[in-house]
């Protein structure tokens, strides 16, 4: 019998307790022994709850109980989660968490602290909800040279883009409906501005580099400027638009970005719709593999936390190696990235646009007093320079 | 330094050696120590080959060398592979293999033998090539109650069906081209009759049940009867056609089948094209996750074998539990499975067909002297009975 504590009895925390309750037999079979939730830390009381008796308000009760071997931090946010996790690791307790904000900010440091104390720090649920992608990167794919990881990492924005595409409804209206349905937060900034996806690609990029990629160094664009017209142009090109977080290895380091991208419809990522997430990993021997599933939701996310608990219990007296450390990874400057761009310009600047970007580019007409074209391969820097010579650019989207 | 042997220096075997050579640093980092290929068993000599000196012709050399801890069996076929694997496990050597034929026939027995000898028997490469699905089932998803596994398990048939759909070319022509390109064997029966997919779903079904599902007990239909017209009807229904291997848990046991299925285009499996494979797993907490990648190919398959080697080396003095045993799983009879069917009947039998299957069914017209319709939900048994009352059934396809 291994005793664990859950910090935070909110959506994910109560999900963790539920998974351990409902799948008791399977969890025990996976671990080789039974798991008991000894404490649940929350500021609130839960009168009448099945686990009322386990609820405590003081983290020190958990910290000082030598019986507790594993702590699931499902509170979210930076503090007090960061302090609690550090204290737990220093006290020789393993920690697993769904807290992507904290992992993106301090993951490498916490991994090193876990190593120093011969315990484990795992965070499968911080990326892609229930999808077992971090474990696979850390395990089955670790002998591969990974040169690219990219994915649809935020369910809310993918839901919005899917509805915009399939129903032809504008961003603001779809966002409002998503909020009504609970698919988007009342304050949706973290999702729609790409900040959430940015934290997730930062975690994936850190694992890929084996070092530390700070989310603050990742160029991030959200989906707020995407319009119905963009989808019409995309359709004419045999593409769709997805918010993609991407990390690619090149000779100068790692290039990471979060932005809306044009994705060809024959790319499997184009078929990942609604609230689903997917992460594509390219290995030198393996080629592309993709992991797909629910990127959020109480039970799916909790299932990933429990997967970490199981892994830790199976290796209780051992540090489970996680491929990141606190040295900053060398990032390749955004300016150097080379790609194609879809650009929308007013009809009045057609001649100027063709002159700047080359006369051979294919023009896609529209009857809105504008037209669009796809550039040749061009660096971000040159694109920016050329774009700035035009006065009526109505929007642009990168091509994957 | 851990020493291993590779049995069979063909496509997969030479791939294993290549992965260990090319990704030497990554393999060592994954294992925590270096791996050396001490022997390569093959009937042939390989003069001039980098690993010429490692080639031996007598398995006993390997069996009797106590330095060899792990054996990669990449010969394929039942014998002598089965004998070699048994002898290796009995001699206290762990075995990993890409040999789906052998795993489907004797996997549970070999897992039990490995357990008895406190060594491991792993076979990631036997299903889905390089896709880390077995490891995930055996590890990250083991605490889930899995109620369904289904997938596109054969790259050759998926390539053929994709070409038929996208190019409107008939089965025979596409098969011939696939053979010319090396995507299909000269004797393609194992692929196009569904036997290969059957072995793979048998392995997945065994893992899902925790017991033994024999491939011989799985109802299997190939793709040889699928026509261009079937794809036209499917398109009108918003669907496509995929060869699906499926195992579902119900109250009466496990229902397993391999057959062409109509798949709605909004199901992610419909977007898995060409030689790619994908496996969808449904867990009670997790919902659907899908694993996607190359289902075959020298390096991708070899990468999965090496993933097993790494796993074994990390747990060298331990049996890695695999969720199957030699007790036959209880299978639910095919007759009871309930689903919809697309049926094609000659125009001359329209009245009879509508009377038998119900007047409310929607009819899809064609100008070939036939029409098609989709039945209501109906058991396989009742469908068979009703279908047999008609004389001009030109084909039928199950709906997923």
Image: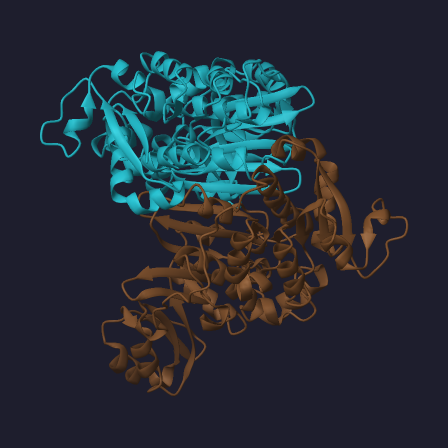
Chain colours: A brown, B cyan
Out of B197 and B1, give the one closest to the viewer: B1
Q: Nearer the viewer, residue B21 or A109?
A: A109
Q: Residue furthest left?
A: B48
Name the residue: 50% across, 71% down: A226
Is the residue B114 above or below the residue A195 in the image? above
| In the image: residue A359, left or right of residue A212 | left
- Please tell me whether residue A112 is drawn above or below residue B91 in the rendered image: below
Q: Quadrant of the N terminus of chain A?
A: top right
Residue A244 locus on image (x, y percent): 46, 61
- Is residue A286 visible in the rendered image? The answer is no
- Count the labels in the image: 0
Is residue A346 positioned above or below B143 on the image? below
Q: Residue furthest right?
A: A48
Q: Position of residue A330 (x, y in %)?
A: 36, 67
Out of B186 and A149, give the one closest to the viewer: A149
Say which quadrant the C terminus of chain A sits in. bottom left
Q: Position of residue B268 (x, y in %)?
A: 50, 44
- Up-down: is B3 above or below A77? above
Whole-percent x, y for residue B73 in the image: 33, 23
Residue at left offset 48%, top offset 48%: A321
Work out whether residue A315 can be spotted.
Answer: yes
Query: Where, by quadrant of the figure, is residue A213 drawn?
Result: bottom left
């Amino acid at each position: 019998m291994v005793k664990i504590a859950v910090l935070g009895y909110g959506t994910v925390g109560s999900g963790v307790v539920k998974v351990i309750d409902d799948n008791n037999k399977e969890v025990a079979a996976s671990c080789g022994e039974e798991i008991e939730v000894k404490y649940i830390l929350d500021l609130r009381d839960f009168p009448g709850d099945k686990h009322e008796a386990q609820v405590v308000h003081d983290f020190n009760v958990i910290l000082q109980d030598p019986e507790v071997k594993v702590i699931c931090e499902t509170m979210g946010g930076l503090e007090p989660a960061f302090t609690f996790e550090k204290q737990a690791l220093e006290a020789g307790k393993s920690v697993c968490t769904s807290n992507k904000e904290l992992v993106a900010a301090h993951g490498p440091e916490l991994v090193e602290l876990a190593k120093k104390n011969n315990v484990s720090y795992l965070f499968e649920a911080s990326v892609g909800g229930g999808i077992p992608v971090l474990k696979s990167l850390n395990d089955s794919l670790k002998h591969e040279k990974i040169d690219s990881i990219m994915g649809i990492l935020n369910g809310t924005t993918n839901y919005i883009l899917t509805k915009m595409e399939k129903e032809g409804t504008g961003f603001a209206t779809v966002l409002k409906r998503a909020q009504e349905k609970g698919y988007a937060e009342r304050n949706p900034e973290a999702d729609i501005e790409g900040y959430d996806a940015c934290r997730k690609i930062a975690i994936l990029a850190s694992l890929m580099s084996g070092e530390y990629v700070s989310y603050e160094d990742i160029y991030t664009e959200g989906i707020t400027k995407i319009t119905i017209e963009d989808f019409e142009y995309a359709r004419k090109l045999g593409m769709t638009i997805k918010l993609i977080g991407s990390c690619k290895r090149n000779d100068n380091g790692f290039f990471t970005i979060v932005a809306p991208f044009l994705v060809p419809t024959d790319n499997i990522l184009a078929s990942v719709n609604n609230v689903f997430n997917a992460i594509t990993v390219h290995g030198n021997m393996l080629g592309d593999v993709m992991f797909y599933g629910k990127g959020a939701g109480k039970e799916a996310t909790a299932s990933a936390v429990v997967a970490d608990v199981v892994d830790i219990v199976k290796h209780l007296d051992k540090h489970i190696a996680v491929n990141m450390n606190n040295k900053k990874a060398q990032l390749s400057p955004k300016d150097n990235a080379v790609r194609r761009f879809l650009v929308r310009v007013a009809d009045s600047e057609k001649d100027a646009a063709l002159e700047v970007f080359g006369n051979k580019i294919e023009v896609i007409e529209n009857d809105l007093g504008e037209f669009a074209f796809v550039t040749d391969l061009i660096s971000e820097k040159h694109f920016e320079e050329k774009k700035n010579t035009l006065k009526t650019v109505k929007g642009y989207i990168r091509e994957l």
